[in-house]
Image (spheres, rainbow, N blue to C red):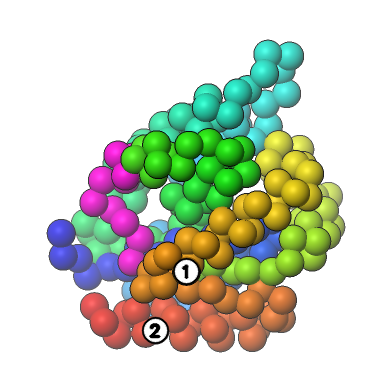
């Protein structure tokens, strides 16, 4: 379906600075008179936020098995796409989403060693036609990202994160998977240097978004 609003997703390992860049981009686009919706995954709807709480913070005695985790992510995504993302895009509202299908491939596929072909089929089923127009992958070394993430824990509500707490080899697999996606889909996924300062990184974000807007 042809549409006039961009669907932009932000991806990256822990501590990449996605949230800051999304906030700056929202302000930049709104200053141009554009309508913008900011959302996130997992979550984005009241029901999907309940799934988020389970996959990120579950601490019960009963194990949360990797296939269960994957299916919970996809259930949340289906709800999110149909209830929030698709209606916004149909109303020509730019959507900025903090994580989307590539996070599932990186974290559950590479990190949790789930079957990648099946995972991609699930992603496709969950999103239907609503593929991102542009994905900005903010990349940086795992050690740097984890240090940043640890430094912010005292300042956020969303702590005790099961995925963030994984060992470093898990996060190395996640980063490698992200970069593999970027190599596979260079038209959609653009890799940005997460080691840049906030302003320099935002200039790179703006350039990519301005280029995408010019092609609408």
Viewer-side residue, 95 vs 100 = 100
Residue 126 among magenta residues = yes
| Mark 2 touches mark 1? (CB < 8 Å) | no
Q: Earlier in the sequence, mark 2 or mark 1?
A: 1
Q: Residue beneath label 1, please? A: 183
Closest to the camera, between mark 2 and mark 1, is 1
The residue at 69%/81% (across/down) is: 196
User: Is 190 on the left or on the right of 138, as rendered?
Assistant: left
> Would you call the spot at circle 2 few (<14 residues within 10 Å), some (14-19), or many (20 or more)?
few
Instruction: Residue 209: give x, y in percent of width and height.
Output: 42, 78
Q: Which residues are magenta?
A: 124-134
Query: What x and y, as percent, mark residue 177?
Result: 56, 56
Which structural element holds mark 2? helix
Q: CA distance from mark 2 to mark 1?
A: 22 Å
In-front residue for pair 106/51: 106
Q: Position of residue 62 (x, y in %)?
A: 68, 13
Q: Nearer the viewer, residue 93 or 129?
A: 129
Q: Residue furthest top?
A: 62
Residue 210 numbered tag: 2
Q: How many marks?
A: 2
């Amino acid at each position: 379906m042809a549409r006039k609003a961009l669907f932009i997703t932000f991806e990256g390992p822990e501590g990449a600075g996605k949230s800051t860049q999304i906030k700056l981009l929202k302000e930049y686009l709104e200053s141009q008179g554009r309508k913008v919706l900011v959302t996130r995954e997992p979550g984005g709807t009241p029901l999907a936020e309940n799934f988020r709480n389970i996959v990120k913070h579950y601490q019960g005695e009963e194990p949360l098995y990797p296939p269960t985790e994957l299916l919970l992510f996809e259930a949340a995504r289906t709800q999110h796409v149909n209830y929030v993302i698709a209606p916004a895009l149909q109303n020509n509202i730019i959507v900025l989403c903090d994580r989307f299908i590539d996070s599932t491939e990186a974290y559950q596929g590479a990190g949790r060693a789930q079957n990648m072909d099946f995972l991609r089929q699930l992603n496709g089923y969950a999103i239907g036609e609503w593929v991102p127009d542009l994905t900005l992958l903010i990349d940086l070394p795992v050690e740097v990202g984890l240090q940043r993430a640890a430094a912010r824990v005292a300042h956020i509500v969303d702590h005790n994160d099961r995925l963030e707490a994984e060992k470093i080899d898990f996060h190395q697999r996640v980063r490698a998977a992200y970069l593999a996606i970027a190599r596979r889909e260079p038209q959609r996924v653009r890799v940005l240097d997460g080691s840049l300062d906030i302003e320099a990184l935002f200039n790179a974000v703006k350039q990519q978004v301005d280029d995408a807007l010019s092609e609408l």
